[in-house]
Image (spheres, rainbow, N blue to C red):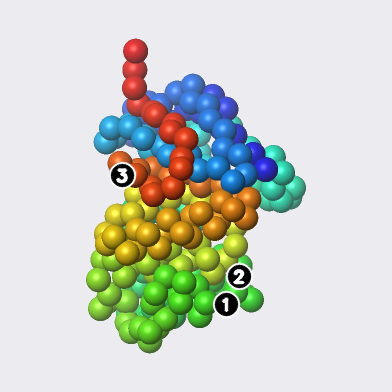
Amino acid sequence: MRLTGSQLRCVRGGREIFAGLDFTADAGEALAVVGANGAGKTSLLRLIAGLIAPAGGSVALAGGGDDLSPAEQAHYLGHRDALKSALSVLENLAFWRDALGGENADIGAALAAVGLDHIAQLPAAYLSAGQRRRLSIARLLAVKRPIWLLDEPTASLDAHGQAMLADLMRAHLGGGGVIVAATHLPLGIPARELRIGERA
């Protein structure tokens, strides 16, 4: 499996963010997208996820599901946690399981993997920032997809949470998955860098 971006161009609000961007990420590989604030790291992830359209170029996945686009085979974990405060931890994850088409997913196991099974019935309004991040990470486990697009994935996680995430990322890569992560901090796993936003 290989995820490829070819001559990608991104324009937001009438301003060109990046152009002529090429990248590849093979099965079992993590790609760390680095650059200054405003360089387009989040925009690149959103473009791969199909949330914004490229102004030029294309994204392709070789060796994935033949009838699915790269976006349909990707999880996008934004830097803001998409949770409903009135729903419990379990209900939030069940919502995402159903929305992502994982009706048979074992969400109890996903909560246990991120250390939240003991508070499954707690409303999300009472979660700390780190717990909210863990719940978002549980989405990656509840519904299996080969591409993980992670925007500042270690944000709000303590040292134990960062180690837990690193273990989960290693397991995903070990199973042949791909990770593209926008980050200012070390991911805790080996990753090839894609530096964007630098102009000659």
Question: Picture quarter containing residue 61?
Answer: top right
**Distance of label 2 from label 3 (alpha carbons):** 31 Å
Amino acid type, mark 1: Asp
Residue 106's label in the rendered image is: 1
Q: To which residue does mark 3 refer?
A: 185
Q: Are marks 1 and 3 in contact (CB under 8 Å)?
A: no
Q: Position of residue 125 (x, y in %)?
A: 27, 76
78 w.r.t. 34: above or below: below
Mark 3 neighbour density, 10 Å: few (under 14) some (14–19) many (20 or more):
few
42 w.r.t. 78: above or below: above
7 w.r.t. 170: above or below: above
Amino acid type, mark 2: Gly
Mark 1 neighbour density, 10 Å: few (under 14) some (14–19) many (20 or more):
some
Residue 102's label in the rendered image is: 2
Q: Position of residue 69 (x, y in %)?
A: 64, 47
Q: Position of residue 32 (x, y in %)?
A: 43, 39
Please name the residue shown 39% across and 29% down the image. Answer: 195
| Numbered disc 1: secondary structure | loop
* Label located before the other in sequence (2 or 3): 2
Amino acid type, mark 3: Leu
Q: Is residue 120 left or right of residue 62?
A: left
